[in-house]
Image: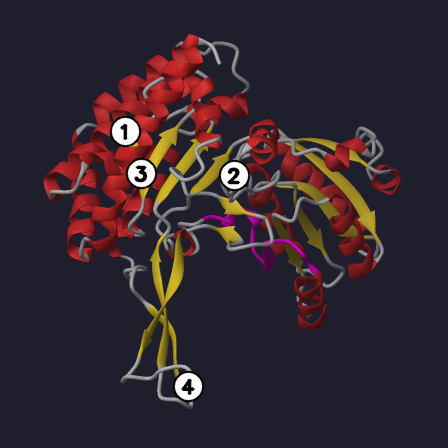
Amino acid sequence: MNVIADDVAQLLDTAARAAREASAVLATAPRPQRDAALMAAAAALRARADVVIAANAADVEGAPGLSAAFRDRLLLNPARVEAMARAVEEVAALPDPVGRVLAEWTRPNGLVIRRVTQPLGVIGMIYESRPNVGADAAALCLKAGSAVILRGGSESTRSAAAIHGCMAEGLRAAGLPEAAVQIAPTADRAFVAAMLRAAGLIDLIIPRGGKGLVTRVQQEARVPVLAHAEGLCHTYIHAAADPAMARTILANAKMRRTGVCGATETLLIDAAIAPSLLPLLVADLRALGCDFRADDRARAIVPDLPAATEEDFRTEWLDAILSVKVVEGVGQALDHIRRFGSEHTEAIVTQDEAVATQFLNGLASAVGLWNASTQFCDGGEFGFGAEIGIATGRLHARGPVGPEQLCTWRYQVIGTGQTRP
């Protein structure tokens, strides 16, 4: 390892050991103290909103040539800073996830066994472009009694530092160690590599960003990873859908914010209603600035739609582009989702409860919705206050990850002198 890499590794070692000490304090800190830190941090975000927005403006100015979707993810404004502060307060108001008795039972020999929640310890959060993720992650980890090391994207270093200052102010106000929330002390990519190798110092790595970041973390990590795949989300409009509802839901699911992972990327529409409804859907979305990639059956109905390739149906656009496919019923819709989807979020629009149940039960995806926009896949909308990410793996947690999902458990066994024969 070269000298620079050695220095970065030492920086990570120092940060992680401080986080480990802070996590021991957080694990036994009473809920009122952790909540006080969050409330003070929210107040600091509001008081320093001008500082945060100015830092963000410098980040945006220093990253020219951004796509519209990337710029939207990076940008902070007064409404978004207020939303950050409000999310931190909402996290504080949630029930305490630490020390809950999940189950309790008594064995024939009189032993009482309890399964009790406990903090994970030290979490490493690696994220791209969206600076509000730092505030969300810090709030959720504090609520769950864990320390966190935040490594944001190089394009948002000033924003991350300004937000971190607000979180640190909250910790100081509540008498908790500032090392409970840290940001990477260097933008060197070697720091990420050091985080991924920090087994024994970091307990869980959470990547939040594009496919390249998530793939790298999953391939290189020597620490357990809680990750999500691409947000290749589908909205399926069934033959029994209410047309007006379908138009409203699809417009929101695709165009509310095109750069978020819960945005619909593919429309599946039943052949029975496609001739009458698809032209209206296309007109609605075109009026909002959307472009399309459509299969042959859809193009037979709306001839000026650009033709789709198979690769288009595998693409998370994160932009104002929608893939379109005409299908024959719920079975074919599920087949398409299983083949091309990323097990993130799917929605069905229908008035037929039996079909909706078949669709929801047939999904392997982390989140399924009936008669609602895919953009509801969000920790705040689920009542978690915020989210640290959307988990699409099969272990530990799935869907929006809030405070409860950032805890593990241990067992407490209470006896009256029993010995094992």
Label 3 is placed on what type of residue? Answer: Met
- 365 part of magenta stretch: yes
Q: Are marks 4 and 2 in contact (CB under 8 Å)?
A: no
The disc placed on residue 107 is: 4
- 182 part of magenta stretch: no
Residue 286 is left or right of residue 149, and the answer is: right
- Residue at horizontal 38 percent and vertical 41 percent from the top: 123
Q: For the residues marked 1 and 4, what is the alpha-carbon distance in whole angstroms? A: 50 Å
Residue 251 x, y percent position in the rendering: 59, 43
**Where is mark 3, residue-wise?**
84
The disc placed on residue 256 is: 2
Q: Secondary structure at mark 4?
A: loop
The disc, 3 or 2, on the residue closer to the chain's N-terminal end is: 3
Looking at the rendering, the stretch of residues picked out in magenta corresponds to 363-378
- Residue at horizontal 25 percent and vertical 56 percent from the top: 93
Q: Looking at this view, is 260 or 195 the one in front?
A: 195
Crowdedness of circle 2 by 10 Å Cα count: few (<14), some, many (20+)?
some
Q: Quadrant of the C terminus?
A: bottom left
